[in-house]
Amino acid sequence: MNSDTPIIEIEGLTVRFGEGEDERVAVDTASFSVAPGETFGLVGESGSGKSTILRAIMGLAPCEATVMRVAGQDIRRGHGKDFYAKVQMVFQDPYEALHPRHTIWRQLMEPARIQKIQDAEARGRAALDSVGLAQALRWRYPHQLSGGQRQRVAIARALMLQPDILLLDEPTSALDVSVQAEILNLLRDLQEERGLTFLMVTHDLGVVAHMCDRTAVMQAGKLVETLSIEALVHGGAVDPYTRALIAASETYGEAPAKPHIQTI
């Protein structure tokens, strides 16, 4: 893929739930693009449609769009195995994302089994190493791990297929404050090592300033403004909602290149 070609290109994405009088528009004609290797944020209040966009991309929510091209594929026509080898998602709550009665190792092997990966065991061991988990933990169950360890397992599972893109749905919001920055720094290290592209959902502007190159601000299903992190940090927001969101944030990061967040 040419580096000038977006790896994610979305135009006119609309997601509706319900019918007739009960119909609700969760995402209203959202458009954005993400360059290869970029971290692009979707930020806004709860219920603004951020996570719904990720679910629509993964085929987990009904949608329509003028353009919906991800990793070189027009996903309006459906999602094949090749798509899921290139695009993986890390969910908000690692406990809910992991099967409670399956060992960590079995859960790492599952995507490899589906994709018929030949070197699955070697990849599994490497995935655990890459997220900083001891090999002995692979025989444990999710309830035997801490929240931070469970999220590391979820990230390791997402890495099993060596994807190009990770969709990150509030990946630290369910974790204790003490481990949130550890997971974010892990993700940044993995991105640098593997050349990953991140599409990250968060409500926390501190996370956006720490992680993202650009961000789109959402309000009530609509994408109201897209701006660089430099503009976000240095007062370049134009839309009144974006300005209000910044003013209301108590955890706003001071600089995008800040190596660690003091409070998240």
Image: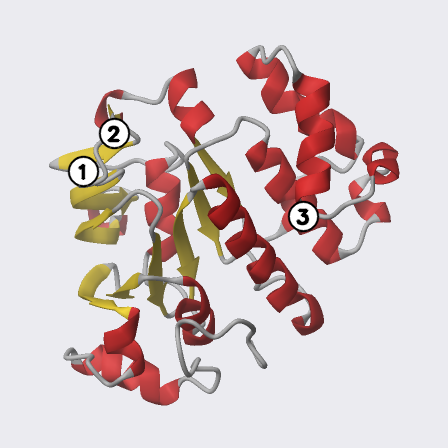
- Asked whether disc 1 touches disc 2, contact meaning CB atoms under 8 Å apart, the reply is yes
Foreground residue, 55 or 7?
A: 7
Foreground residue, 122 or 78?
A: 122
Q: On the image, which quarter does residue 240 sit in?
A: bottom left
**Image spot of residue 127 (x, y percent):** 66, 35
> Which residue: 82% across, 50% down?
145
Regarding residue 176, the answer to whether it shows in the image is yes
Q: Is residue 145 above or below residue 179?
A: above
Foreground residue, 169 or 228?
A: 228
Residue type, label 3: Arg
Q: Is residue 230 above or below residue 92?
A: below
**Image spot of residue 155 (x, y percent):** 60, 43
Tally of marks: 3
Foreground residue, 27 or 236?
A: 236
Regarding residue 95, the answer to whether it shows in the image is no
Q: Secondary structure at mark 3?
A: helix
The answer to which of marks 3 and 1 sits earlier in the sequence is 1
Position of 84 with respect to 16 (left or right) is: right
Q: Secondary structure at mark 2?
A: loop
Residue under numbered circle 2: 1
Q: Secondary structure at mark 1?
A: loop
The CA distance from mark 3 to mark 1 is: 31 Å
**Image spot of residue 87 (x, y percent):** 42, 33
Residue under numbered circle 3: 152
- Which residue is situated farthest in the front direction here? 193
Residue under numbered circle 1: 5
Q: Which corner quadrant holds the C terminus?
A: bottom right
- Asked whether disc 2 touches disc 3, contact meaning CB atoms under 8 Å apart, the reply is no
- Could you classify mark 2 by the number of other residues whose Cα lies within 10 Å: few (under 14), some (14-19), or many (20 or more)? few
